[in-house]
Amino acid sequence: MSADKFLYFGCYQEAGHYLFESIEGHLRKVHNRPEFNFDGLLCPRDPKPYVAALTRLGGLGYSALAFWDYSVDSRGGSNSIFFAPSLVCSGETIAKGAERFFPEVWRRLPEFHFHASASAPAEQLYVPGQWRCPKCSFTLNQFNLNASDGSVTTRDEAGDKCPNCNSPLWRMTWRQDAMEMAERLANEVQLRRAAEERVKVLEAERGAA
Ligand SMILES: [Zn+2]
């Protein structure tokens, strides 16, 4: 098999943990990849089922989404892992891949939640609540006003379109934000120098008068 496929480790139709690849949505056992045997090692410490933790496996070039899973085998220690062939993908992306490549496994899960470890990368990558138009650079800060307690929190759901050109808005990365801030700062410094020069001229004129 190629080294760049989604993989699933866990129970399928019977007790016992095995590694599977997806052949057009059907599971086929993989016997020759012992490096993917992380049985029970990558799940959250808390034994609550269907809460998926994200782990980067640098040496393998894979990311793993692992959770305690009692949907086939109800005995303690039963777990499932979805492996995605990427070191930067989000937990959501792995879950989407799981749904697409292992639909039988995905459908049998009674519920599914992300552990805090699975959402951290998105927070590190994007400015919370900030959206931007890739065409005209219009920037929008999205907030929710929570009527129950009056608090204001950032809103990161897609959907809003640019009021200038009707393009879908993209999330703003911290890098884009930092570069824009640097540009704005350079402009401000120029304005300040010009203002200082103007003050000098005015003071000289007053001194001469
Ligand atoms: Zn626009």
Image (cartoon, rainbow, N blue to C red):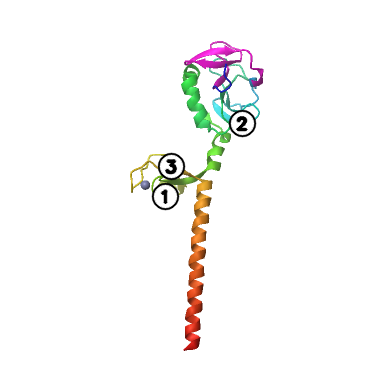
- Residue in front for this viewpoint, 4 or 54: 4
Disc 1 residue type (three-letter): Thr
Indicate which disc, 1 or 2, sits on the residue closer to the N terminus.
2
Label 1 beta carbon within 8 A of ligand 1: no
Picture residue at 54% right of the left edge, 36% below the top: 119
Is residue 196 part of the magenta span, yes or no?
no
Residue 95 x/y as whole percent:
50, 27
Picture residue at 56% right of the left edge, 20% below the top: 7
Category of crowding for the residue at label 2, using alpha-carbon neighbours closer than 10 angstroms: few (below 14), some (14–19), many (at least 20): some
Indicate which disc, 3 or 1, sits on the residue closer to the N terminus.
1
- Residue in front for this viewpoint, 19 or 175: 175
Residue 27 x/y as whole percent:
52, 14
Residue 153 x/y as whole percent:
46, 47
Q: Are marks 2 and 3 in contact (CB under 8 Å)?
A: no
Is residue 15 part of the magenta span, yes or no?
yes
- State whether residue 39 appears in this view: no
Disc 3 residue type (three-letter): Trp
Q: CA distance from mark 2 to mark 3?
A: 25 Å
**Magenta segment range?**
6-35
- State whether residue 191 appears in this view: yes
Disc 2 residue type (three-letter): Arg
Q: CA distance from mark 3 to mark 1?
A: 9 Å
Relative to 17, say whether 174 is above or below: below
Label 3 beta carbon within 8 A of ligand 1: no
Relative to 208, say whether 87 is above or below: above
Residue picked out by circle 2:
56
Residue picked out by circle 1:
139
Indicate which disc, 2 or 3, sits on the residue closer to the N terminus.
2
Residue 170's tag is: 3
Q: CA distance from mark 1 to mark 2?
A: 32 Å
Outermost residue, bottom direction?
209
Picture residue at 53% right of the left edge, 11% below the top: 13
